[in-house]
Image (spheres, helix red, strand yellow):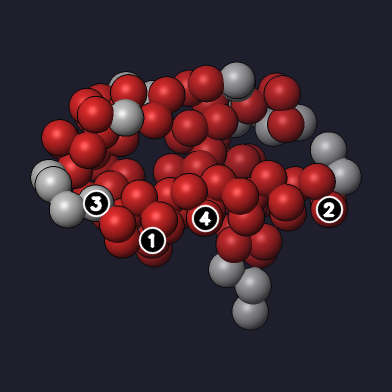
Amino acid sequence: MTGKRMLAFAMGLLLVVSLITVGYAQSPSDYCTEYGDLGISHDACVSCLNQGIGNDAACVCKIIGDTVGYAAYGFNNHGQCVKSLVPFIHPN
């Protein structure tokens, strides 16, 4: 995946995760249940919402791994995904 596509994908998922963490009025568990656990396990969904925006690269990668698989985006595993996305999500 090219850098521009990766950046666009990461920023899109970051926006979704950010809006969810900021915008839910009910408990994270209720929110995850209402929205189909965002395509991941219920525990992972609740954990991502509870940990907030500082954990966004790990949550985006969890969603990738649990839905389409890391290989779909050229990653071998969760750690490689996180390491690749952090510079796009949290540039210095």
| Amino acid bearing label 1 | Ile
Are the two marked residues, 3 and 2, in contact with CB atoms closer than 8 angstroms? no
The alpha-carbon separation of the residues under discs 3 and 1 comes to 14 Å
| Amino acid bearing label 3 | Tyr
Residue that mark 1 sits on: 53
The alpha-carbon separation of the residues under discs 1 and 2 comes to 22 Å
**What crowding class fits label 1: few (fewer than 14 Cα within 10 Å), some (14-19), or many (20 or more)?**
some
Residue that mark 3 sits on: 24
Q: Residue at x 66, y 63 (%)?
A: 87
Residue that mark 4 sits on: 15
Residue that mark 2 sits on: 4
Question: x and y percent of residue 90 in the render?
Answer: 57, 68
**Relative depth, front residue between 86 and 27:** 27
Question: x and y percent of residue 82 in the render?
Answer: 56, 47
Helix, strand or loop under label 3: loop
Counting residues from the start of the chain, the first of labels 3 and 1 encountered is: 3
Give the label, 4 or 1, closer to the camera: 4
Helix, strand or loop under label 4: helix
